[in-house]
Image: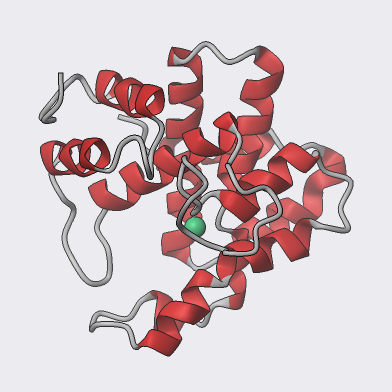
Amino acid sequence: MYGATKTKEDSLRILTVNEEPLVAALVRLDKSTFLHSLRTQKLAAALGKILEVSVGELHLLSIGALLHDIGKYYVPERILNKTTPLTAQEKGVIKSHSALGYYYLQPMALSEQIKEMVLCHHRWADGEGGYPKFAAVKKPSFLTQIVTVADVGDAMLSDRAYRPPLSVAECIGFLEKNTPHMFNRDVVKAFKNFMGGKGGISP
Ligand SMILES: [Fe+2]
């Protein structure tokens, strides 16, 4: 699989000396979000390779996936780790994390493509739904659409505070059911390919 623990240092090494504040920002995330970020980076990079993105894009994708939830630092852990249903207000706080992460990165000398991955990773592939609503780029870039599938795939396959991991078949079924509106068809196919074709409902 794409487990994070064995290659944690490798994942963080893609950030250069000039980007050390970002390593510090990642490390201070709550443990669950930190490990999810490492796994999402591994998964997004694997999908990027299957989709034959260029070497340069693969580098941007890896950093964007690693940083995608950096804004969760601003979300209280009691909300992130809540085991009972979230209130509407708590959902709103969680949904603010992508914009907060973007604002955090905004003054940094970092590729705009990476910042867009952080801002738009919860927007739908067709640009019609998701959040934040005010995203400057309505339709996420292809690289961001890869981060989205890697993010959702890892979240569904992982143990969460409020539920145990879902099966690969359930995960692929959800992704395919919401393609192409929420998720990019080619990226979902790559995810299915990467997961060994287990489960799934479409040809
Ligand atoms: Fe997120």
On the image, the x and y values in percent for residue 50 come to: 43, 14
Which quarter of the image is occupied by the N terminus?
top left
Residue 184 position by quadrant? top left
Image label count = 0
On the image, the x and y values in percent for residue 142 come to: 56, 30
Work out whether residue 54 or residue 78 is closer to the camera in this orientation and state it: 54
Residue at far front of view: 128
Which quarter of the image is occupied by the C terminus?
top left
Residue 60 position by quadrant? top right
On the image, the x and y values in percent for residue 61 come to: 61, 32
Q: Residue at x 53, y 49 (%)?
A: 121
On the image, the x and y values in percent for residue 189 come to: 31, 22
Work out whether residue 164 or residue 149 is closer to the camera in this orientation and state it: 149
Q: Residue at x 73, y 53 (%)?
A: 22
| Residue 90 shows up from this direction | yes
Work out whether residue 46 or residue 180 is closer to the camera in this orientation and state it: 180
Colouring used for the render: secondary structure
Q: Would you say 64 lies left or right of 37 here?
A: right
Query: Quick check: 138 above or below 3?
Result: below
Q: Residue at x 81, y 46 (%)?
A: 19
Work out whether residue 148 or residue 9 is closer to the camera in this orientation and state it: 148
Q: Would you say 118 lies left or right of 125 here?
A: right
Q: Residue at x 87, y 43 (%)?
A: 18
| Residue 4 shows up from this direction | no
